[in-house]
Image (cartoon, rainbow, N blue to C red):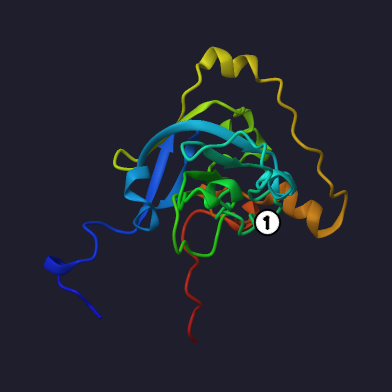
Amino acid sequence: MIRTVDTALSAEGGLAVLQGSLAPDGAVVKHTAADPALLTHTGPAVVFDDYEDLHARIDDPDLPVTADSVLVLRNTGPLGGPGMPEWGMLPIPQKLLEAGVKDMVRISDCRMSGTSYGTCVLHVDPEAHVGGPLALVQDGDLIALDVPARRLDLLVSEEELAARAAWTPRPDPYVRGYGRMYARHVTQAHEGCDFDYLAAEGEVPEPAIH
């Protein structure tokens, strides 16, 4: 059903592009699917280095997590995944589900196919695998999400981040073939996750008609 402006379901579109110290080149959130109470939220990070780490620890009863925590999944972007897999709807820890928690802030450099519910911030760019700020986040760091202001910030001083700069990228597992070509040429999320050699300025001319 097409609604009138006066009876719109929302005052603005369903997606918001965020920027800030944690996502200098942007991130995306479907804020109409989020708990309104979480659209402005600051909480301590609980960091998972990759999907295997998430799978192994998310339901550990000893995981130091509360409803105010911000779940962070990294190394799942265009290169880190590789392929920017659809892992963005991070699960809520079982012990919080049992306590009645239905939503919490979740941040990742991967993507997802739609967002049926949840405060899920996706496409954090640059991704952790190439040394984006997401790579430097540590457990307990405060992260501030402010959707009305379109901000996503890591509340850690520049001096502290500089001290963490001894970051080393994960080794490239591909030595030849398509994987190697992909790793060398795929672009970041804000550039479309396309091969760089397919991009060019200007328009493609229409073929001549004879």
Residue 168, position as x, y percentages in the image: 75, 28
In depth, the one of 55 and 200 nearer the eye is 55
In depth, the one of 88 and 35 nearer the eye is 35
Q: Say which residue appears at 39% left-offset and 47% top-offset.
A: 17
Amino acid of disc 1: Gly
SS for callout 1: loop
Q: Which residue is mark 1?
A: 83
Q: Is residue 90 left or right of residue 30?
A: right
Residue 182, position as x, y percentages in the image: 73, 54
Q: Say which residue appears at 74% left-offset and 48% top-offset.
A: 52
In depth, the one of 58 and 51 nearer the eye is 58
Q: Could you say which quadrant of the image residue 53 lies in?
A: top right
In depth, the one of 21 and 44 nearer the eye is 44
Residue 135, position as x, y percentages in the image: 63, 32
Vertically, is 2 above or below 69?
A: below
Residue 164 in view (yes/no): yes
